[in-house]
Image (cartoon, grey):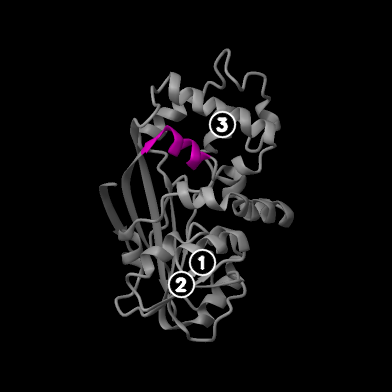
Amino acid sequence: MADEGARASGGALSDGPLSEGPASEGLLSDLTPEERAKLAASFGGVAVEYERFRPGPPVEAVEWILPSHARRVVDLGAGTGALSRILVDRVDEVVAVEPDQRMRSVLVDALPEVRAVDGRGEAIPLPDNWADAVVASSSWHWMDPVPTLHEVARVLVPGGVLGALWSGPDPESGFVAQARALLAGGPLAGSETEGVDPGEEPGGGGLVRLVMGDPDRLRFSLQIPPGVPFEQPEHFVHTWNVALNSEELIGLLGTFSWIITMPEETRTRVVGEARRLLRDVVGLEGDATVDVGFRSDAFRARRR
């Protein structure tokens, strides 16, 4: 990974990365509970691929969130443990809270030193005042914010830190912008997705939205409403490059929920078109790699 830089600002809430998906996933408040649950549960079906292809959060963002005295930390919505891997080298005890047994199993196999428990943001199975920090990596948006804020406050020691961060392909980076421009016109003549009606697919708006999501969706951030015992958050942005080959890019694409939850036939055609474009237009095949820009938006808020 080649670091491109970072910046921080006190209390700023600005646009974040293209971290999780299209407008339907950024505007979770517009979804029914059933639709939200379906998206949230989709990752367990690709837990092994998620572990292999999803780059974890940057160390710089995690270290910025963690208080200097942190000994016990909760990885909230831990998934397969990308954040826990960083935490175990920096604190004395890590508890990974993850509701999906399939994701949790991958985490336990890879990180036996981490205590993994079944739980969620609204119901954390830990005693009062247990943690110095509670950190959610690309998972906070799946939780009901106000009940979760109160539950996190219960688990944190006074002055403890809540951290929320999102990491993913940066829509403003060179390769991602190039891919958007390439896909914006829809399927090319003779392509494997010719005949697909984008209006029937999740997100709509043509192949660009099918493959990459909606660039105009609501960006993720940690927001502290009145009545919860937290100070307003600080915001830190970190950008970096990841060299990925064609198979890694296709693997990464297959871990996003709007791809996972497509009908199998549509998903096969969309992934096939993405593979064809990487080969025939970008010239990416075999071990050849391209630098993909990633961005992480990190937020931290202290418990009063």
| Farthest residue, direction top | 189
Q: In the rendered image of this protein, does residue 300 appear above or below residue 68?
A: above
- Residue situated in front as seen by the camera: 113 or 133: 113
**Label 1 vs label 3: CA separation?**
30 Å
- Which residue is depicted at the point 55% across and 45% down? 256
Q: In the rendered image of this protein, does residue 89 appear above or below residue 51?
A: below
> Number of labelled discs?
3
Q: Which of the two labelled residues, at mark 2 and mark 3, occupies the earlier sequence position?
A: 2
Residue 172 picture location, percent across and down: 38, 38
Front: mark 2 or 3? 2
Query: Which amino acid lies under the numbered mark 2 shown in the image of this protein?
Result: Val
Q: Inspect the magenta stretch and tell me whether residue 83 lies in it.
A: no
> Which residue position is annotated with label 2?
114
- Which residue is depicted at the point 44% across and 26% down? 278
Q: Secondary structure at mark 1?
A: helix
> Which residue position is annotated with label 1?
108
The image quarter in which residue 226 lies: bottom right
Principal secondary structure, stretch drawn in magenta: helix
Check contact, mark 2 vs mark 1: CB within 8 A: yes
Q: Which of the two labelled residues, at mark 2 and mark 1, occupies the earlier sequence position?
A: 1
**Label 2 vs label 3: CA separation?**
35 Å
